[in-house]
Amino acid sequence: MSISGDDDAARRAGAILSIDLGAIAANWRGLRDAGRATGRPVDCAAVLKADAYGTGAVVVGARLAAEGCRHFFVAHIDEGIALRRVLPEPPIYVLNGLLPGTEPDFVEHRLVPVLNHLAQLNTWRAAAQRFNRALDAVVHLDTGLHRLGFSAEDAQVLINERGRLRGLRLALIMSHLVASEDTSNPVNGEQLSRFRTFVRAMPGAPTSLANSSGIFLGPDFHFDMLRPGAALYGINPLPGQPNPMLPVVTLHAHILQVRRIDAFQTVGYGGAWRSARPSRIATIALGYADGYFRNLVNRTQVHLAGRAVPVIGRISMDLVTIDVTDVPEADCQPGALVEVLGPHLTPDDLADHARTNAYEIMTALGRRYHRAYVDGYAGGPSDDAGEAA
């Protein structure tokens, strides 16, 4: 990777995060097409919560709207307000629902709350009366995750008393899968059955069940709208199988210094690594303040000049040390770029090393990185782009 000399921000940056918008768009198209495989019309939304999994919700949202995406999900109302500035028309759904007193904000910015219990429904209906207009709403049914959503008891109340929706437009009925990445888990079928039962009792509204992995459970799970998040950003929706998604992010960090040490010397805080031979140690410009987890100590590698290079010693707030003894000196001078994430080590790979999942790796990506957007897989917007809201 090279940096243009006239790109001052990139030249000054300790690390550069490259985000391929074309790959995100291609991943969205692939997921959309999977939903359309049976010939039935199915919408494909985009989940942009947590700043589009660390890739930049405003930029990604605009790119996907140009691609033809017409529905967007965020977690918090402020995420929706920021997104509304660049997406003036399409529905933006707020998964965490209504916090007390936020109804005017939802109305002002034309955001749609995902209602998670009867009290939120009552509050939103009262807002419709207060503002003297019909307001869109999403009903979230808890089919087994036991996190957010209408309980079975609340759902039955709504079935029996449809009048509770008076003044609201039911824009969507949704639920969330517990273990969709495990295709053999019987809980998937159990949730599908519960969701179908509720949908049959509440006819007339669009429906949505499948998240990223849920799309790969097959057409029975697709309903009217797919809600991919992680898969858009290159995270493997099929753990243990080849990743069907295109990679989206690469991360490179600059070498700040290279030093020689004798055998049996320690490196970093606490002396967590000791050299077994005379060694050359490079220090690179990222750390746990940038989302590079402290528990990666002595458990992962980066790549330099085509070689896997071990990360050694404790991860510091701003610095990481690597053993470059086996790398030619000409390839590891101060200023050289080291691949931290990319073709040789994906977010899923790094997550395995950190004993977490790629969602946490992606959403932890630091704000100090210089962000470079490219469109490597674009090929131009799809045929649906002209219909984008």
Image (cartoon, rainbow, N blue to C red):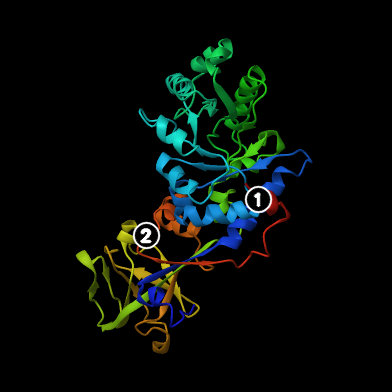
The answer to whether 347 is drawn above or below residue 189 in the figure is: below
Name the residue rendered at 67%, 59% in the picture: 381
Front label number (2 vs 1): 1
Residue 358 visible in image = no
Q: Look at the numbered discs 2 and 1 and tell me whether their residues touch, using CB distance below 8 Å.
A: no
Residue 282 visible in image = yes
Residue 205: image location, x then y, percent:
64, 26
Residue 10: image location, x then y, percent:
41, 74
Q: Which is nearer the eye, 52 or 184?
A: 52
Q: Earlier in the sequence, mark 2 or mark 1?
A: 1
Residue 67: image location, x then y, percent:
64, 54
User: Which element type, helix, strand or loop, lies under badge 1?
Assistant: loop
Q: Residues within 10 Å of mark 2 (few under 14, many from 20)?
A: some
Q: CA distance from mark 2 to mark 1?
A: 29 Å
User: Which element type, helix, strand or loop, lies under badge 2?
Assistant: loop
Give the image quarter of residue 212.
top right
Q: Which is nearer the eye, 332 or 311?
A: 332
Name the residue rendered at 69%, 53% in the picture: 386
Which residue lies most toward the left here? Answer: 270
Which residue lies most toward the front here? Answer: 132
Q: Which mark is residue 366?
A: 2
Q: Amino acid at mark 1?
A: Gly
The answer to whether 321 is drawn above or below residue 191 in the figure is: below
Give the image quarter of residue 143.
top right
Residue 178: image location, x then y, percent:
52, 34
Which residue lies most toward the top here? Answer: 160
Left or right, residue 4 beside residue 203: left
Q: Which mark is residue 209?
A: none
Left or right, residue 61 beside residue 330: right
The answer to whether 220 is drawn above or below residue 193 in the figure is: below
The residue beneath circle 1 is 68
